[in-house]
Image (cartoon, helix red, strand yellow):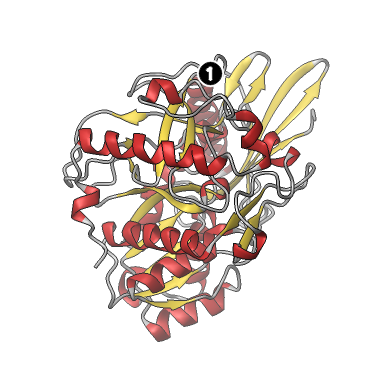
């Protein structure tokens, strides 16, 4: 079983003391690395979180500048695996793991899955990429640790996915939200009703930003519970925070991570409840601890106790990344604000593309979105009325008048991996 009551329902005061103890161990361990040896030479012991918050932030650029081994704290012979980002804009960010680091990570994923209702008798179909990407392999080892039969099928090949779901009576999937919506269209083409013809109960979605409206749409289409998760490769990958049965924010595992919310402009630590940038510190990773890492993800700590009884604080759904924000003629817009509006309209499909162009020295926002043929097969006049309605809803939400183009179902590009939603031609 992976209901660790003594850890998950620990008293807040005891959890705070535990974190201070682990932060001191962490600082001493981190000093074994080339990077932190220089940065932490003034820090011997911390007695409070305010002491710890005096340590400078670590950034993605620091990780790139320290490539490949400046953050490693142990002999390379003790490292059993590395994961890496794509490194398309310079050196990749590389994270090293010992066997114990991987065991701790697997335990966290198992704890997450159990919290959402997965049990040993479930059949888990992992529809995420494997390899340097942490999402697929992280859930794989967590599911096996939990004892669930695991199908490491990977992404794509929808007919094959459906065949495995039918033959092995898959009950749980790990899937991109965009692919979950696309897979549903393949089920329709095959004449399969997932509510009646499949055994699915639970889906874990992540790896790309999505709105509450998208989650509810997947739940409605499949007749299942969909759980939101949060992770990033710098903090191992998935398993940093996860929803419980109440689906009201993600419990952040504070026995493994110390979390802060900061003002992204000033770096000031904000009180619980205020929205800002999430900053994370590993508490247990040996090979490559990271201190006060700026994730660039925008969220807030949710105030109040959770009905599930767990005392670890919850973070809200990620609003977006501070570096993903679009500035359109001086107006700040997050792509998820646009998705939120599009997913509310049943006449629209799941696939859309946001494009930004510079025309006559002004920014122009274009949104192409597919029609959902199941709900809309109207006249040109009705199409124009729908288009006008969507434009008005978007304008009210984002404060910018977009140019919306409704296109045929299946006409926009589709990706096997993460969906490409935003194309900024100004860059």
In percent of width and height, residue 360 lies at 83, 16
Q: Is residue 265 above or below residue 419?
A: above
11 or 358: which is nearer to us?
11
| Quadrant housing residue 61 | top right
Q: Is 155 or 79 nearer to us in this picture? A: 79
Marks counted in the figure total: 1
Q: Is residue 340 above or below residue 416?
A: above
Q: Is residue 298 left or right of residue 65?
A: left
Visible in this render: residue 182? yes
Local SS, label 1: loop
Q: Position of residue 157 (x, y in %)?
A: 60, 73
- Quadrant where the C terminus sits is top right
Residue under the point 35% across and 30% down: 301
Residue on which the image places disc 1:
267
Determine the image quadrant of residue 110. Answer: bottom left
Q: Residue at 22% of width from left, 38% of height from top?
A: 14
Is residue 315 visible to us here? Answer: no
Disc 1 crowd, CA 10 A, few/some/many (<14, 14-19, 20+): some
Indicate the position of residue 355 as horizontal and vertical percent values: 70, 35
Could you tell whether 108 is left or right of 15 in the image? right
Point 38% across, 25% down: residue: 49
Question: Horizontal and vertical percent for residue 414?
Answer: 66, 57
- In the image, residue 397 above or below residue 58: above
Residue that extends furthest to the bottom in the rendered view of this protein:
167
In the rendered view, does 375 fall on the left or right side of 62? left
């Amino acid at each position: 079983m992976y209901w660790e009551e003594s850890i998950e329902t620990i008293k807040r005061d005891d959890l705070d003391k535990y974190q201070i103890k682990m932060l001191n161990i962490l600082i001493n361990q981190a000093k074994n690395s080339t990077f932190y040896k220089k940065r932490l030479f003034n820090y011997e012991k911390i007695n409070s979180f305010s002491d710890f918050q005096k340590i400078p932030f670590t950034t993605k650029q620091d990780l790139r500048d320290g490539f490949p081994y400046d953050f490693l704290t142990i002999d390379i012979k003790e490292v059993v695996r590395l994961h890496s980002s794509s490194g398309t804009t310079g050196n990749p960010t590389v994270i090293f793991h010992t066997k114990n680091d991987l065991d701790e990570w697997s335990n966290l994923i198992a704890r997450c899955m159990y919290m959402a209702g997965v049990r040993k008798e479930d059949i888990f179909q992992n529809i995420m990429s494997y390899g340097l990407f942490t999402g697929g392999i992280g859930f794989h080892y967590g599911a096996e640790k939990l004892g669930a039969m695991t199908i490491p099928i990977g992404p794509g090949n929808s007919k094959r996915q459906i065949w495995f779901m039918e033959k092995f009576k898959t009950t749980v999937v790990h899937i991109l939200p965009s692919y979950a919506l696309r897979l549903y269209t393949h089920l329709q083409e095959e004449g399969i009703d997932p509510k009646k013809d499949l055994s699915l109960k639970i889906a874990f979605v992540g790896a790309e930003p999505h709105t509450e409206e998208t989650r509810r749409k997947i739940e409605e289409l499949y007749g299942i519970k969909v759980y939101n998760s949060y992770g990033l490769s710098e903090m191992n990958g998935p398993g940093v925070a996860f929803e419980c049965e109440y689906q009201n924010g993600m419990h952040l595992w504070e026995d493994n991570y110390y979390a802060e919310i900061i003002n992204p402009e000033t770096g000031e630590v904000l009180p619980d409840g205020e929205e800002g940038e999430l900053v994370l510190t590993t508490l247990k990773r040996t090979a490559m601890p990271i201190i006060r890492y700026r994730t660039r993800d925008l969220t807030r700590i949710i105030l109040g106790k959770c009905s599930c009884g767990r005392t670890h604080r919850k973070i809200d759904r990620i609003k977006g990344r501070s570096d993903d924000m679009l500035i359109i003629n001086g107006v700040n817009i997050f792509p998820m604000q646009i998705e939120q509006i599009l997913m509310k309209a049943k006449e629209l499909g799941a696939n859309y593309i946001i494009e930004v162009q510079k025309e006559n020295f002004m920014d122009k926002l274009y949104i192409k979105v597919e029609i959902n043929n199941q709900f809309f097969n109207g006249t040109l006049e009705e199409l124009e009325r729908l288009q006008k309605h969507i434009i008005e809803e978007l304008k009210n939400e984002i404060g910018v008048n977009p140019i919306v183009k409704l296109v045929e179902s299946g006409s926009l590009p589709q990706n096997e991996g993460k969906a490409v939603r935003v194309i900024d031609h100004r860059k």
